[in-house]
Structure formats: C-alpha cells, structure tokens
C-alpha cells in the first residue's frame, strides 16, 4: 500500500511535534493546511505537505485527489461501556415522565437492570451485538476505543464481558483497550453489606482478571451512593499488584473526592467531572492524570456539563469521550460529542478536535502511535464529504460527515474514487 491523497481542501494532522498530548492554549493552535497532500505507506503516515510543495519525481505511488474534503485523525474514544446485552428505553421514557434515578432503581432499572440482561445473554450473542456497534462506530469515524466491563457484577459475568472485549481486540484492526469495572454498582446480594462486595472484588475478581490478563485498566465508580474514595483506593491498590492501571469514574453525581483519589493513585484519567471546582482542578494540575469530560452524559441525563474552559485555562490536556452505554449515554457517535463540545463546553472546533483525537489517544496510552497524522504513526484518518471548513462539521450536527475512514491505511467500507 502506497498512496498519496492530493488536493485535500483542509488537512488537520493534529501535529504535536512528538508531544503525546496537547494542553491548555496549545489545543487551539494545532495546524490547518489548506490544499494539502498526505502520503500513506505500509499502513503508516509517510509525510504530508502543501500542494504548492508537492514532492517531485514520485513514481509507483497511487495519487488520489480529494478536492473539497477535510482529512483529520480518526476519533479515539477513551471511555465506553459498549458491551451490553439490551437497551433501556423504558427508563428513558420514565425519566421523561419525571421519575428520579432512585425511583427507576427501585423499579429494578439502572445498572442492575443491565446486569440482569448480561446474565441472560450468551457470550456469543454479546460478542455479535458489540461487534455490530463497533462497525457502526467505525463508519462514524472512530478508530480506537476503550471498553469497560461492569454489567456483570459477579465473577462469572464480569469475566464473560471481559472475554468478549478480548475477542473484539483480537479480531478487529482498530485498537481496543479493556477495563475491569467490577466496582460499577453494589449488587443486590451485598446491599446490606457493601464492604463485602469490595472484598469480593479484591479477593476473587481482580486475581481472576489479572491471571487471565483480561484487562488493561481498573475502574471504580467513585461517587456518592456508589464507592467511597477509601474503597476506591483499596480496589486500585489490589489491582496495581496485577499491573492494572486506574482510569476511574469520578464526580458525576457529587463532589465525591473521586478526582483526588484518582490523582493519589496516579490514575491515567479521571472521567465524568461534571461536579468539580478549584480544589479538583489544582489536584489535576499537580499530576499527570488526564481530565476526561463526557458531554453525551450531561446531555442525556440533563446534568451539568463539566467546566471545560476552566480545565483548559488551567493548562490541562482536556479529553472528551462518548461514555457509550445503555443508561446514561446511548450513543458512541463522536461527531455528536464534537458538537456538544463546541456548543455546551464552548470549545473552539480545533480544541474539541484535539480532545477527541490526540488527547483521547493519550487517555488510551497509544498517542505515540495514534491520535495524530505524523510521520511514522498509524494511518488512521477520516475523509469528510465536501465541507467549507472544519468548523462546519460540529455546526451541522445530527448527521454524519464522514465519507471514508482508514485504519492503518486500509479503507473500511468505501474508498475514495481512484483507489485500487
Ligand atoms: O458512565 N456512571 C456510571 N456508569 C455509567 C452509567 C451506566 C448505566 O446507567 O448503565 C456512566 O454514566
Ligand atoms: Fe462511564
């Protein structure tokens, strides 16, 4: 494979000059090349430049003109729960009619409902459903993903979910990272003794997950009514013995101490952060932990949006992800996250793009290989339909603008005309 896309209307490589993430004001200043070319060789980016400086004496390279189109890196979605057995639209209707989260839980809804669905679903069926979802996400421009367990809530079903994720990892060409989220909710059997479940996670589940090498990361829902910072730190310490690094759910429902717990445990990222203030922001400033906002959840649950502008003003490397799950964010469409980032988080289009590409890759620890189109990195990129400017993508929300997606240089679905 050796081709050059030429006459690209706008090429946005999200060039970070070797840096593994872009922080603060650097997020807005990533390069836009007008009328550009992009050379792909053996699945990697070879070079890019302006048409006015097109390399001479090129032979045996296929040229593919894509006038009017915009090219940028594939989306790197660092937070999903896309292995689930069934949708929960009845809960959605109940919420429209005014039922609270607690009332829904009392009716048997919420995470525990998804756990019942997982229990009744075979591993093969679960795999097929997740595989279909990922195919749709690739068509929408996603080229790297994290997937969590957390709807099993007992050893057998957590392992079932993680084995499905492992098979997806092995069978697909996009990068997938796997996260063990046994501490997603307190199952009914431990309702009167939540500490017993924490012990079960530490003594039974983590060793089994670790021994089978089924996860890259450990997650805990560290929030009011779920797991406390103390319980979280205990779980993270047990997981560290198996090499599982933390990526945790924090501060979605309350100022829970989750951000500080994540920073203390040297988490790769703390995710959600709908409810944070200056104490959480300064804790993040003194750490290498990445702040991940999930605006799809704020939209769908009508809860506050995280303070994206404050995080950027504090010089932090903001990440946005989808949180794709059947309860609080039933969409993994990163183009919609792009629009929400601009509209509700007040990010400039380039800032939002950095947050869902390079910085997303950093939250997956793959930004040395993915997340930007720099020489030597994987040729994972999107080609839009004709658009006047990158800002038109989040502006025209609610439809897909992605005409072609390449993973390691190979077009998934249709290729631009002229491709052999
Ligand atoms: O990230 N916050 C915790 N977990 C999910 C919700 C899961 C569900 O309701 O199924 C989230 O929003
Ligand atoms: Fe989540």
Image (tube, rainbow, N blue to C red):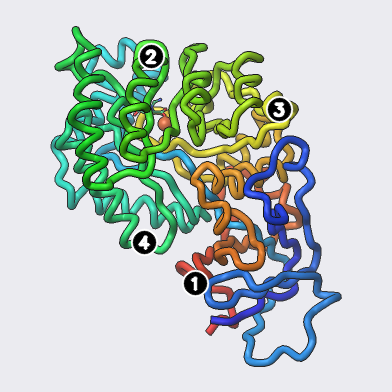
Q: Residue at x 78, y 82 (%)?
A: 55
State yes or no: discs 4 and 3 in contact (Cβ < 8 Å). no
- For the residue pair 212 and 389, the one nearer the viewer reads as 212
Q: Quadrant of residue 307?
A: top right
Choose the circle earlier in sequence order: 4 or 2: 4
Choose the circle earlier in sequence order: 4 or 3: 4
Q: CA distance from mark 4 to mark 3?
A: 36 Å
Q: CA distance from mark 2 to mark 1?
A: 46 Å
Q: Is mark 4 within 8 Å of ligand 2?
A: no
Q: Which mark is residue 172?
A: 4
Tell us which disc is closer to us: 2 or 1: 2
Crowding near pointer 3: few (<14 within 10 Å), some, many (20+)? some
The residue wearing badge 3 is: 309
Q: CA distance from mark 2 to mark 3?
A: 30 Å
The residue wearing badge 1 is: 410
| Helix, strand or loop under label 2 | helix
Choose the circle earlier in sequence order: 4 or 1: 4
Q: Position of residue 266 (x, y in %)?
A: 50, 30
State yes or no: discs 2 and 1 in contact (Cβ < 8 Å). no
- For the residue pair 211 and 366, the one nearer the viewer reads as 211
């Amino acid at each position: 494979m050796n081709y050059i896309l030429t006459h690209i209307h706008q090429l946005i490589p999200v060039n970070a000059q070797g840096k593994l993430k872009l922080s603060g004001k650097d997020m807005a200043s990533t390069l836009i090349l007008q009328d550009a070319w992009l050379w792909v060789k053996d699945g990697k980016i070879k070079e890019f430049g302006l048409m006015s400086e097109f390399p001479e004496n090129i032979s045996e390279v296929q040229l593919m003109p894509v006038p009017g189109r915009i090219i940028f890196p594939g989306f790197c979605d660092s937070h999903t729960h896309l292995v689930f057995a069934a949708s929960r639209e009845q809960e959605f209707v109940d919420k429209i009619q005014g039922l609270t989260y607690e009332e829904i839980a009392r009716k048997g809804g919420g995470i525990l409902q998804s756990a019942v669905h997982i229990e009744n679903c075979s591993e093969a069926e679960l795999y097929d459903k997740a595989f279909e979802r990922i195919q749709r996400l690739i068509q929408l421009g996603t080229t790297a993903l994290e997937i969590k367990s957390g709807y099993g809530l007992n050893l057998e079903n957590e392992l079932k979910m993680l084995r499905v994720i492992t098979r997806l990892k092995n069978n697909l060409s996009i990068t997938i990272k796997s996260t063990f989220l046994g501490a997603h909710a307190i199952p009914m059997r431990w309702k009167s003794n939540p500490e017993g479940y924490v012990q079960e996670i530490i003594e039974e589940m983590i060793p089994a997950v670790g021994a089978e090498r089924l996860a890259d990361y450990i997650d805990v829902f560290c929030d009011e009514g779920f797991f406390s910072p103390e319980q979280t730190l205990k779980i993270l310490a047990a997981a560290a013995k198996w090499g599982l690094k933390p990526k945790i759910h924090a501060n979605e429902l309350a100022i829970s101490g989750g951000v500080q717990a994540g920073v203390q445990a040297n988490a790769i990222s703390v995710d959600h952060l709908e409810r944070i203030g200056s104490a959480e922001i300064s804790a993040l400033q003194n750490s290498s932990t990445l702040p991940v906002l999930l605006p799809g959840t704020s939209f769908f649950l009508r809860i506050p949006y995280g303070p994206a502008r404050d995080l950027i003003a504090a010089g932090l490397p903001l990440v946005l992800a989808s949180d794709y799950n059947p309860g609080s964010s039933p969409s993994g469409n990163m183009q919609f996250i792009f629009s929400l980032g601009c509209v509700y988080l007040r990010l400039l289009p380039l800032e939002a793009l950095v947050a869902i590409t390079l910085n997303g890759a950093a939250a997956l620890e793959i930004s040395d290989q993915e997340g930007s189109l720099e020489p030597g990195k994987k040729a994972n990129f999107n080609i839009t339909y004709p658009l006047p400017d990158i800002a038109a993508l989040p502006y025209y929300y609610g439809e897909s603008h992605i005409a072609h997606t390449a993973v390691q240089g190979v077009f998934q679905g249709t290729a631009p005309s002229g491709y052999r």
